[in-house]
Amino acid sequence: MKGIRQAFEEQLDELQKHVVRMGGLAAEAVEASIQALVQRDVELSAKVMEIENQIDAFNLDIETRCLQLLALQQPMARDLRTIAAVFRIITDIERIGDYSVDIARQARVLAAIPLFKPLIDIPRMAETVSRMLHNSLEAFVRRDLDLALAAVQEDETVDHAYHSLHDELVEYIQRDPSLTLQAIRLLMIGVYLERMADHVTNIGERIFYMETGELKELHE
Amino acid sequence: MGCDCKIRTENLTVSYGSFQALKAVNLSLHSRRIIAFIGPSGCGKTTFLRALNRMNEIIEGASTRGRVFLDGKDIYAPEVDVVSLRRSVGMVFQRPNPFPMTIFENVAFGPRLHGLARGSDLAELVEQSLRRAALWEEVKDKLRQSAFSLSGGQQQRLCIARLLAVEPEVLLMDEPCSALDPISTLRIEELMRELKRNYTIIIVTHNMQQAARVSGETGFFLHGELVEFGPSSRVFTSPEDRRTEDYITGRFG
Amino acid sequence: MSQAKSRWFGYRRRLANGLLGGFALLATVLALLPLILLLYYMAARGLPALSLDFFTKSPKPVGEPGGGMANAVVGTLVLIGLAGLAGLPIGILGGIYLAEFGNNRFGWAVRFAADVLSGVPSIVIGMFIYALVVLPMRHFSAIAGGAALGVIMIPAVMRTTEEIIRLVPSSLREAALSLGATQSRTILRIVLAAAKGGVITGGLLAIARISGETAPLLITALGYNFLSVRLDQPIASLPVQIFNYAISPYDDWHAQAWAGALVLVMLVAVLSLAARCATRGRLRMVR
């Protein structure tokens, strides 16, 4: 149905592309931060900070675009919901970026000391989070509700993984209190990943709203 | 019929010759609301409005079928007095159309016509109507001047005052602001919100933003059909019908 | 395009404009020439003969100098009055009918008849009134004259009235109807009020036209050399008197004829001016 609001459609398109790029950067940050942890690579940590700066820049830019579209184009119905969704989605993506930086910081500290246990849960959680994020972005582009829902459902997996990580680390601490500091750092990385998963769930909810107009809690 | 609505239409169909302008419209409108109707040119929304006070009958070749109930009584029944119907259901038009008389005479025309008031009562009625139309302060010193000495926005408010003077129950407004500048438009919208407390207001408009701003419920007409009708908050954020969505997002030609 | 070429085209354009404007001006002057000459002649010949006597005295017997055209002036006024009394109401009401209710075959027929009537030579209308009024009455009369002039007026008044009323915007009508006015009330109070100026103009212009009609009066009102306001008797009128004086052999009668012509033209001018004035001001609606 193109033609009448060509300029507006193009602007909406641009907007959505920017959101996807921002989301892509966040995914990159997540992956890089876990890599930094696993490979004990300090340079990679620094790279994560760099990516996060770009994410912040996108956040500002997209928000400005949204405001302009609201003021100048008087969007209605679906278009209005899209822009409202984008406002919230970029906030969630931005938080994911922040958490990546937090992970990267912890990775830098942990890179200097030997780890008392191999990293299994954390990389797995990160993989799930990364996949959830990619799927959500795809669902956003394609307006695919099923994909969004599937991504959201994986939050459960992350929650479970977090709880088991938590229990494992508590056990380690109880056995050997000198490991407490390192354990805490690892736990915090787990927390960050769990929060990231929550934010991806939020993104899924916003996609659902965008399509159906319903605001629904999609996860527990 | 168990409906406490002000106006109810039942299979309202209006044709001009062989052209069907309205197709079996079924609607319930409640009192003390502002209800807006939107739709592209020629969709039948103005025809619908005019059917509510039988102004369609002025047009040659127009035939109306179906029923329109005002407070439960069919306004197209043969024993209905059209004159008193039009007193209860009044109309404001797209371009302000004051009579070529003084401001006072314009507002007094209706009451005089129906013998509602005389002398000092009439003067009071005129003042009251002008106050209700938010025009009194601006014209109280020049009631004997020609209505044409007023600006467009003021003339439209004068037409509203003229209408209020016959003490109607329902106000029909056919794109009342389309000939006015933005400030006058907002003024009249404000006036509508005040009037809503005592009257039922039905407005037809091309301006979707106006419909969104002003109305509690909105209906969308397309090719003579009422495609969707519901709370404005819903129609403009999540319309149920795809055609409504296409129209209000401007994807519709 | 080179500068020289564009300059040439510009010059050609201006030349063409100037030529056209010049020719138009010339044509206008030529068109005005007869009118100017006419006015000049009438003023030159007529003014000297214009005096108080002209307006107060009736013609003297043949051969005697002096006298005036008081009878003709009064007669013309009487005839115009009679014609107006008959022609204006019929014409205006007819025009109202055609404008408001005349969108059918009957209306079409009426309009056609009016157009035909307005094209009928005035002498023929005079003959018609002769047969209708003069013969039964067995003599010429002011009434017959008034009737003839009235019949001439009717189509003109009807058409202008109809057109003026049609010009009243339908939005005014709708406003009145939507307030609960019946159609007749709407027409009387609103439409006519808005069309007032135009209708008056139409009437005045029709009167101006008939005030100069000569041929029909010759066989209806005939003419009379004395001042009279009797409606059932022949009556004088300016055009007829002018005609009689003009074909007479007497110089002072010729002079009076010029004076009479001047008065007639002045009458038409005043009526036209009044018509103009009536259409200014409140007629923003209908213009």
Image (tube, coloured by chain):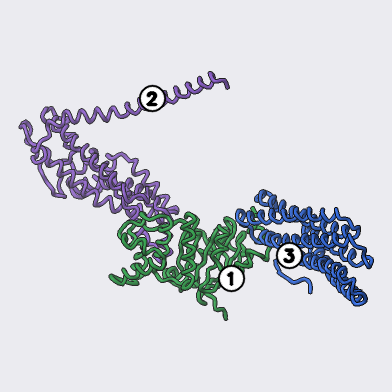
| CB under 8 Å between discs 1 and 3 | no
Disc sitting over residue C22 in the figure: 2
Colour displayed for chain A in the image of the structure:
blue
Near-viewer residue (C128 or A186) = A186
Going 70% across and 50% down the picture, which residue do you hit? Answer: A10
Q: Residue B220, position in %: x, y?
A: 61, 63
Q: Colour of chain B?
A: green
Residue toward you, B210 or C244? B210
Q: Are marks 1 and 3 on the same chain?
A: no
**Residue denoted by label 1:** B27
Q: Which amino acid, mark 3? A: Arg
Q: Residue furthest top?
A: C4
Q: Colour of chain C?
A: purple
Q: Are marks 2 and 3 on the same chain?
A: no
- Quarter where residue C267 is shown: top left
The structure residue drawn at horizontal position 73% and vertical position 56%, both measured from the top left corner, is A56
Callouts 1 and 2 on one subunit: no
Question: Is residue C1 in view?
Answer: yes
Inspect the image, locate mark 1, and give the three-letter code of the amino acid beneath it. Leu
Rendered image: mark on residue A206: 3
Q: CA distance from mark 1 to mark 3?
A: 34 Å
Q: Residue furthest front?
A: A178
Chain under callout 2: C
Quarter of the image with the N terminus of chain C is top right
Whole-number angstrom distance, CA of label 2 to CA of label 3? 76 Å
